[in-house]
Amino acid sequence: MLRYIAKRLLGMIPVLLIISSLTFFMIHKAPGGPFSKDKQVSPEVLKNIEKHYWLDRPIPVQYLHYMGNVLKGDLGPSFKYPSRTVNELIADSFPVSLELGCYALLFAMFVGVILGSLASLRPNTIFDYAPMSLSMIGICAPTFVIGPILVLVFGNYFKWFNTGGWDSARDKVLPVITLGLYYCAYIARLSRGGMLEIMNQDFIRTARAKGASTFRVIVLHAMRGGVLPVVSFLGPAAAGIITGSFVVEKIFRIPGLGRFFVESAFGRDYTMMMGTVLFYAFFVILFNLVVDVVQTWLNPKITIDS
Amino acid sequence: MRRGKIAWVWLLGITLPCLLMMGCGKRVTRVEAGDQTQVYHRGNGADPSDLDPQLITGDIEHHIVSSLLEGLVAEDPKDLHPVPGVAERWEISEDGKTYTFYLRKNARWSNGDAVTADDFYKSYQRILSPGLGSEYNYMLFVVENAEEFNTEKVKDFKQVGFQVIDPYTFQVKLKNSTPYFLSLITHPSWYPVHMPTILKFGKMDERGTRWTRPGNFVGNGAFRLSEWKVNNVLVVTNSPTYWDAKVVRLKEIRFYPTDNQDAEERSFRAGQLHSTYEVPLTKIEVYKKQYPDLIHIDPLLSTYFYRVNVKKPPMDNLKLRKALAMAIDRELIVEKIRRGGELPAYNLTPPGTAGYTARAQIKKDFAGAKKLLAEAGYPDGKGCPPIEILINTHEAHKTIAEAIQSMWKENLGLEVTIANQEWKVYLDTQKRIDYQVCRAGWSGDYVDPNSFLDLFLTGGGNNETGWSNKEYDNLIAEAGRTGDQQKRMEVFQKAEAILMDELPIIPIYFYTRPVLRQPSLKGYYPNILDLHPFKWVYLESTPGKKE
Amino acid sequence: MATPLLQVDDLAVSFHTRNGIVRAVRNISFQVNRGETLGIVGESGSGKSVCCYSLLRLLPMPPGRIESGKAIFDGSMDLLSASIRDLNKVRGKRISMIFQDPMTSLNPYLKVGQQIMEPLLIHGSTTKAAARAQAIEMLKSVGIHDGEQRMEAYPHQFSGGMRQRVMIAMALITKPDLLIADEPTTALDVTVQAQILELIKKMQGELGTAVIFISHDMGVVAGFCDRVNVMYAGKIVESAGTQKIFEEPQHPYNKALQKSIPSLQQKGKELFTIEGLPPDLAGDLRGCPFAPRCAYAVDYCRRDPVELLETRPGHYSACLRVQRKEITLQS
């Protein structure tokens, strides 16, 4: 197992190298630069600024310089925030995105699995149709629609929660729900399907025949297999939730990394772009590894060595 | 049956907490709390990128920095006329070229140091240092040898027109008499910086050091920096060391980055902001009807226009340009599309800029436009190649471009297409003058026609139309030398007349700034630069109106 | 005479589907005495499994529904109307089940040991350690001697026969009064079949458990059961002691079933099959349900209502012609 993990971790290096090289040359090829503005900067000033950031050197030189720094763990200064380094910005903002993502994922899993299992217990009744049609809405409606609607209802009308920011619990409820809703809906459907299938299995009948209570049957016997499709979905879901929080972060004014990811591209903040791409790539690969490991633990039929 | 019961229990388990929360009911909003404690919650637009007054470029940073630092001269909160800042008084020489400032002795930095003439001298040396690469250093180029020092034609800063007479007397020598000089030096590029602090965190002319971070920043303004979380909030609190601290009533200003208009509006409605940076276009009418006391349409020193590539056929044809300019129904655009109280623009400089209103005006004349088009060789648009309007991707620009597209088609019979590009790509295309017609906007940096008209100097960095006119260049230069305000304005009239005759640009409308403000926000006056010296702002909830 | 261990009266089970009501078990009555082995035989779809699942209410409901009947267990408790809570106290403790397919009847996500111990833990009164020791002991008595290690394995690491041994161990660990075995050998290799049957018999002998043995294989039943109920189309058509069933069949269907036991036929002969298909259970049946396939059927067979009647002492038949003594059947 440990050898397997080590092998996977080593495998990350070439992947990250390819990603970073591709990104580096692509962003330097894109029209417009970090310092182009609608009020033109005078050529002399621009020259001085570019000199400061090594942008006056040939691209390959810049690349080697940058990669050299990356190897030392230095992602460079941000062009948008001159007094901050990319390392600092990621260190400040990623925990926020991670927190948001974790809450959203927890919410999605908790509510999704419960709703899905509930629906699967009495298929084709109101207990099935109601949550499943709700989940259809959750899947179809985009975040930028759900978010404002939630804010209008619970922030503006009822005034239970705050409409933006990321400090108090009141700030966090709506963005977590908004971000998690799609995944919640998806997980509800997955776990309904999974549970329905499991509940029709012979071994569930065996468990009942042993005198196990409904609760025990569901939690001990059915859940484990029933949530397997959910677990395999968790990898992409976690990656999607944590890297895809841009819209939610924007709607709710959340100081997370998702915003840098997108806005650095619009602002041609080369170093920030490289930093976020590298970081996210690392994160996504790592997360897939974690999910694979969890899956083998949940399903004894899968073994890693084969 | 039994399972049904369990299902019900689960359903209840989910809905009950929600129902309980409803009981929480009403609570004091952030705005209501702020009114009591003098904490101003301000929607401040995009996230500020830095607080170094010599490196910042946007009004977003400008607003924050203006609370942290104070120049020789400050602005009056109502009409922004120059009032004493660090300088308690000043003298102007006969020829209008030498300004002597007498600094007040009780001006202090936030670390307790006295603010002296030497601080200003060193600050200006820093901003003019080529290595710093300050984008707004040209604001100082009115000073003798300032530009020369910046471009390294003059090596010794002593030759630049700044002089420390004594610790509390500072003298500035200008190239030409510059009547708007006192207005100019209220700009952040003229703010002093605390050199010992800067040197503590890096070299004098080093960009992006940590001196602007909370805990490091030393300022001389009415407020001091206490918190700065990227994309979250920036907090300033009133400074006890400020020389005029007794008039400052706000305890704290919290600047929130709000780059999403709709989110900002919702926050305002939820009582989380005292004022917004903008109002979504679609909400303006609603507020005007339902909450006229909350929405304010402030004037703004800013023009929306189209650049025209005069080098490339068919746009090199002056008659075609004129026809295009005359065939736009600007009233329709501002009244039916913008609806934010904008004024239709028939010239470039916003009316009433430092008392100047251009006489040269484009006519709205569809029949005349048609005639001109025929004279240009395209009767009823026949034979004219399709015209492409370039915009940066944005709903508002698209709507306007579509309106103009249909006006040109209907009034002139021209084929018009719209191309949109992502912001930085659009900037690049515009800079390379690789377009036919291109959407643009310009805000004045200071209240003077020069801030608009010097854009279109031959080869100017912001010209971007390929247009060049010797006479125009001469007139702008002449205005720079003319001390007599009235004569100067006449020169601008002549220059703008040439511009409006040759039409390298097609003005569309003069911007306004629709904003939302709580009635409790006092000492806050609308003005064209959207500057609101926070030392005069305070909060006072109107009793009886709200519970 | 002592009260029977299980007395089933007038049991009717149907499935309410989109295509109508399928009446799978049609008002049958039977009893199981302590320590005896009752065989229930019939073709697939004859209702024998449904009948047994409904006793422990293990049918999916809906669509399944118990329409009527009583199943008095141990003289006191009606399994069909008891609360789930009370029923759960009996399930796995006093009545256990073994299922047809050992490949799917064990939970693939749980360790075998955990599953064997589960009945003990559910029904309380033992510590985990004690349950463990008992489970290992039980594994030993079903012929798995490295129980200690096998406890930690997952079902997919076992062969089919081994899994059925595990099932048996699991079912009998609580020393139940009644074991319901639903075709426990059907899915197994022939060689393993015999071992498993042997094992059930051995365990029954040790524990004195009564067994309901469901099978479609007359041959297996012959050597295994004390009494046999023959089911056809949701009804019991013949019931008697095993010997009588085989020596003096009282129903043409029983006779046909016996004829189809492969081992009783000579080599080289074509396999005997019963012509036709069992009736569609979705509607009412008139007359004898087997009549359309019966070589002895006459007009009234297709018309007159049929009942299970004692045709010889201790021997019950639902054949009208046998009841009227119009025919005698030879084995």
Image (tube, helix red, strand yellow):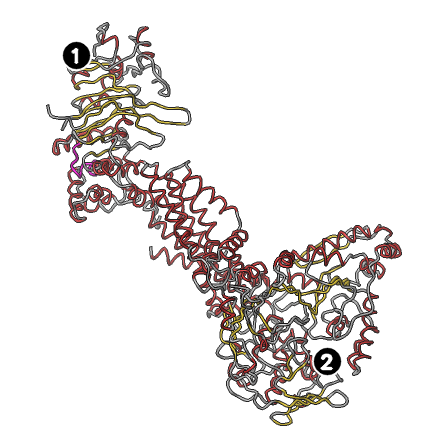
| Mark 2 on the same chain as mark 1 | no
Q: Residue furthest bottom?
A: B166
Q: From the image, tell me which residue sits under label 1.
A: C312
The question of residue C205 being in magenta is answered with no
- The answer to whether residue B531 is left or right of residue C265 is right
Please identify, in this view, whether the residue under mark 2 or under mark 1 is nearer the observer.
2
The question of residue C172 being in magenta is answered with yes
Q: Give me the chain letter of mark 1.
A: C
Residue A85: percent from the left, percent from the top? 51, 71
Work out which quarter of the rendered image holds the N terminus of chain B and state it: top left
Are discs 2 and 1 less than 8 Å apart at CB? no
Q: CA distance from mark 2 to mark 1?
A: 128 Å
Q: Which residues are magenta?
A: C168-177
Q: Amino acid at mark 2?
A: Tyr
Q: Check disc 2: other Cα within 10 Å, few if <14, some if 14-19, many if 20+.
A: some
- The answer to whether residue C220 is left or right of residue B309 is left
Quarter where residue B183 is shown: bottom right
Q: Nearer the viewer, residue A95 or C329?
A: A95
Name the disc covering residue C257, or none: none
